[in-house]
Each structure stands twice: as structure tokens, then as C-alpha cells.
Image: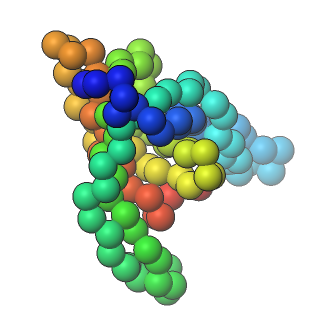
């Protein structure tokens, strides 16, 4: 991976679930790390979710190795767009992670 391709600053966020006084759960997202990434858009489409039409974009991000990263986390870009991590491949030779993500249908 060439350093010049890492031009997208992303915040990696992890979810924390806490039990409320009424017995329900509250989900909050907190910052895990900030990373530079290479971005490659793969596909975009419209989907019907929850009775509403939503736009979905498949995106692949390549980042340097990040210990503790998992597919339960999400990414946030500088513009506030959210990306769910759907798959992750680690390359031990180049010490990178390739993240298959979806923008538009987020776990909130």
C-alpha cells in the first residue's frame, strides 16, 4: 500500500450497551481509533428497508493494521457518513486490513 493512497481520515467507533433503570438497553458509540484509509466504491443501489427507500453504497477501505478491530465496529468519515463493517481481511505480509463496508443502512 502506498502512503499517498491513504487520504481518507476515518474514526473507528465501537458500541457499548448499558442497561437502563427500566431494564432496556441503551446503545452508545464511542471513538476507538482514528485511521487513514484508501477508499474504493464498489456498488450503489436503492433498497426498501422498514417501508422506506434507502440508498446503499458498498465501499472497501484499506487501512494499516489496527489491533482490536472487529466487525461489530463502524466507521465515520469527516462528513459524518457512517459505514457498517461487514467483512474484514487481514494481510500479515503488508500489515493491513481490508474492510468491506456498507454506507446507508447503519446499525445506529
Whether residue 67 sits left or right of residue 82 in the image: it is: left
Which residue occupies 66% across, 46% down? 27
Location of residue 51 in the rendering, given as x and y in whole percent from the top left corner: 49, 86
Whether residue 93 sits left or right of residue 25 in the image: it is: left
Location of residue 64 in the rendering, given as x and y in whole percent from the top left corner: 36, 21
Q: Residue lying furthest front in this view?
A: 4
Q: Residue lying furthest right in this view?
A: 21
Above or below for 49 versus 101: below
Residue 104: tell me if it is visible: yes
How has the structure been colored for display?
Answer: rainbow
Which residue occupies 66% across, 34% down? 30
Above or below for 21 versus 106: above
Location of residue 98 in the rendering, given as x and y in whole percent from the top left corner: 27, 34
Location of residue 70 in the rendering, given as x and y in whole percent from the top left corner: 39, 30
Which residue occupies 27% across, 65% down? 43
Whether residue 80 sits left or right of residue 24 in the image: it is: left
Q: Quadrant of the C terminus?
A: bottom right
Front residue of 102 and 14: 102
Q: Quadrant of the N terminus?
A: top left
Above or below for 55 versus 71: below
Which residue occupies 56% across, 45% down? 76
Residue 70: tell me if it is visible: no
Amino acid at each position: 500500500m502506498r502512503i499517498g493512497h491513504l487520504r481518507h481520515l476515518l474514526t473507528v467507533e465501537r458500541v457499548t450497551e448499558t442497561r437502563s433503570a427500566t431494564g432496556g438497553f441503551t446503545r452508545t458509540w464511542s471513538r476507538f481509533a482514528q485511521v487513514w484509509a484508501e477508499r474504493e466504491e464498489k456498488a450503489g443501489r436503492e433498497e426498501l428497508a422498514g417501508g422506506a427507500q434507502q440508498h446503499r453504497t458498498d465501499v472497501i477501505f484499506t487501512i494499516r493494521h489496527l489491533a482490536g478491530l472487529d466487525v461489530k465496529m463502524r466507521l465515520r468519515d469527516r462528513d459524518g457518513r457512517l459505514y457498517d463493517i461487514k467483512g474484514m481481511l487481514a494481510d500479515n505480509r503488508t500489515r493491513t486490513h481490508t474492510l468491506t463496508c456498507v454506507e446507508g443502512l447503519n446499525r445506529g
